[in-house]
Every structure is written in C-alpha cells, then in structure tokens.
Amino acid sequence: MDNPIQFITDHKEQILQTYQELHALAEPSWEEQRTSRYLQEKLSAAGLKIKTHTGHHGFTAEIPGQKKSVIALRADMDALVQEVDGAVIANHSCGHDAHSTMALYTALALKNSGISFEHTVRFIFQPAEELAEGALKMMEEGVLEDVLFLGGVHVRPHMEVPFGQAAPVILHGSSSTIKGVIKGTPAHAARPEEGNNPIEAVSILIQSLQRIRLTGGKKFSIKMTELHSGETSNSIPATARFTLDIRAEANETMEDLLTKAKHIIERTAALTETVIDYESVGYSPAAIKNESAVRIAQQAIGSVLGEENTAGPCVSQGAEDFHFYTWKTPHIAATMIGLGCDLRPGLHHPQMSFNTEALIYGAKILTELLVRADQEMEEKPL
C-alpha cells in the first residue's frame, strides 16, 4: 500500500503543470466543457468511476468503499469573465483552477494508495460557482445522496490566511442582489413640472437605504452598485435602472435586511409616485459552522503543516455557493478549508496570482482530510 501523502510529494511537477494547463483553459460558468473533459480523462484513466450529467459539464468521480455512505470533496471549475489588459475574457482570478487541481490529485493519490475505504469517496466537480447556481444544480441531480461529510477548499488572500498556513473553516457571509427599474414620466428639462424624474426617486431611495439600522450590532452592507438613466442633457428620462448589492454576516440578518430593503423600495415608489419593478437575484447563503467537520479539518491541517500553522476561522465578507450544500442539507458535516498561499492583490482582481507551492500542501491537507473523515464519520454525522 502506497502513502497518499508521498504520492503528492512525488508528483509535485505534474501538479504544477496541471495547474498551468487548467489556468490556460479558463471557461465561463456553464461553459466548462474542456476543463471538465480534461479532469474526467485523468480521473477515468486512474480507474475512478465517472458520472456525468445532461445539460451541463459538472460531474462526479468515485472510489468505492465498503459502505454505501459517502465522504465527499467538492471543487469548482468555472472562471470569471472580466476585463484583463483591455480585453474581456474568461479569467481564473478566483482560484477555481487551483481548487480543481488539488481535488484531482487528492483523488489520484487516494486511488493509487490502495487504501480500503470504509465509505465511498466522491469527488464533486461543480460548474457555475460564480453565478451561485452550480451547487443548487448539482444537488438537484443527487450528488449529495448518502453523503455524511463534505469538504471544500478555497485559496485565500495574504491578509486573511498567511502562506504556509490553512484555516479549518471559512465563514463566508450571505449575499444577495436586487435589480430594479424605476418608471417615471419623461418631459423636456425646461418643463420639469410636466414629468416625474426617476433620477430624483433614485436619490431618495439611496438616502433611505443608508438609514437602515439593525439591532444587536449585526454586520451588513447595502449599496447601489449600478445606476443607468437618461441619454440627453435636456430631457427628463422615463426610467432609471439600478442594482443593489446586499451583504450580511448571517442568513437571519439577510432575511431582515431584504425585508427592510423591499419596504423602502415600495415606500419610495409611493412617495415619488413612480412605479418600481424589482426582483431579488443571485442569493448565496452564509456559512453554517459544523464543529465536527472543523475538528477533522484542524487535525488534517495540523498533521500536514503542524498545529502552529493551523489558523483560526477565516472570516470573509465574500460569498460562496458551497454553502448551499449545508444550508439545504444541514445534517451533513461540512467545512471549507481556507488555504494560505500569498494570494495578491486579491480575489477577483484581474491580475490575481499566488504562490503555487501552496498547491502541494493544499492537496496533502485535502488527502489527509478525507482519510480522517473516512475513519471518524459514522452513519449519522458526528
């Protein structure tokens, strides 16, 4: 029987090469065809059982265990679409190519080890994380069937988790978006009394949103991030189109915030005698901390990096659709590891880069995570 951790060490150059190849493949959400095929070919060649789905490029790969129950690891595959050096392209500035690389070599290391697993080991390669849609789609198609434990990983900016360290849990907040159109009455700018200016309604809406207060010191933000109205300097426009970005540290806080925001929008419409059509889109839930999963992750990180390099919880203002898995199925013990990798300037920055040496100890941590989860998980989550 081969040591899976040693397998990672022995395949360092291949891991770094795989990362570069996946980085070059960068494909938008729901268009991850080449990325998916690349990963499937390597996993299938190693003898893992592949299951694909109709209508998208997400898939799972499995190592059979003695039991039907499952321990699982999730990775995302899609890239952002953003402007890079003047061109709008698909760009891996969120690290999904790194996540897929580490999950791939975790699977290869465990398969090569010949370990007789108590549970089936499932690797979930998910599309469309950037749209907060991929996890929900994969759940619809049964990827969490029989799952007791679910792990994930995300590379972290240098100010959150230092290089050479890892956090056993990332506490992402909840996020949501409200998109709306304010319908006023157009008129010549010289005769404003004949119209109803939707831009003025926007100004009232912004001021009202800024006055939102929540009890108990709950952390949140609500801000207008898009506003489009008017085409000429001498006309009052008929409409104004806006977008609100909403963030909250907990799911309950988000529910309260959305209720207040919708009340303010409707009150603004009544006050300004406009019509405001709006909808909530792009919701992502906050992380739900599972102590059992976090403990297993702490042990895995400590085994690979030492206890002194096991960071505390990584608190992030960003969002992650991994948390749909736990929000919808809270009985599953799950956690997302935050990998310190000297990532700069930051996630989603078009020039994001990190120290790829972190891929090696990241894959080792994920390998150790699944080995320990297989040993510790019972038919009912701990």
Image (cartoon, helix red, strand yellow):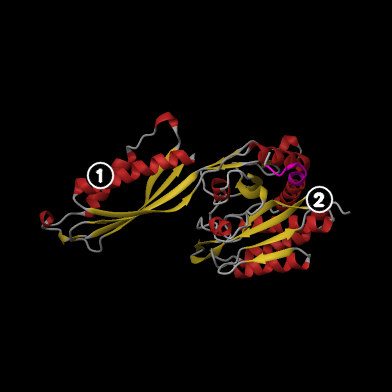
Labelled disc at residue 267: 1
Helix, strand or loop at mark 1: helix
Q: Judge whether residue 87 can be spotted in this image.
A: yes
- Where on the picture, by quarter, is residue 189? bottom left
Q: Is residue 197 left or right of residue 256?
A: left
Residue 255, placed above or below residue 136: above
Q: Is residue 266 left or right of residue 71?
A: left
Residue 326, placed above or below residue 107: above
> How far is disc 2 from disc 1 in space, using C-alphas?
60 Å
Looking at the image, which is closer to me, 159 or 25?
A: 25
Quadrant into which the N terminus falls: bottom right
Question: Is residue 14 a member of the stretch shown in magenta?
Answer: no
Looking at the image, which is closer to me, 361 or 324?
A: 324
Q: Residue furthest right?
A: 1
Q: Judge whether residue 334 can be spotted in this image.
A: no
Binning the other alpha carbons within 10 Å of mark 1 as few (below 14), some (14 to 19) or many (20 upward) gives some
What's the amino acid at mark 1?
A: Arg
Give the tally of numbered discs.
2
Helix, strand or loop at mark 2: helix
* In front: label 2 or label 1: 1
| Residue at mark 2 | 5
Q: Which residues are magenta?
A: 372-380
Question: Is residue 376 a member of the stretch shown in magenta?
Answer: yes
Residue 13, placed above or below residue 344: below
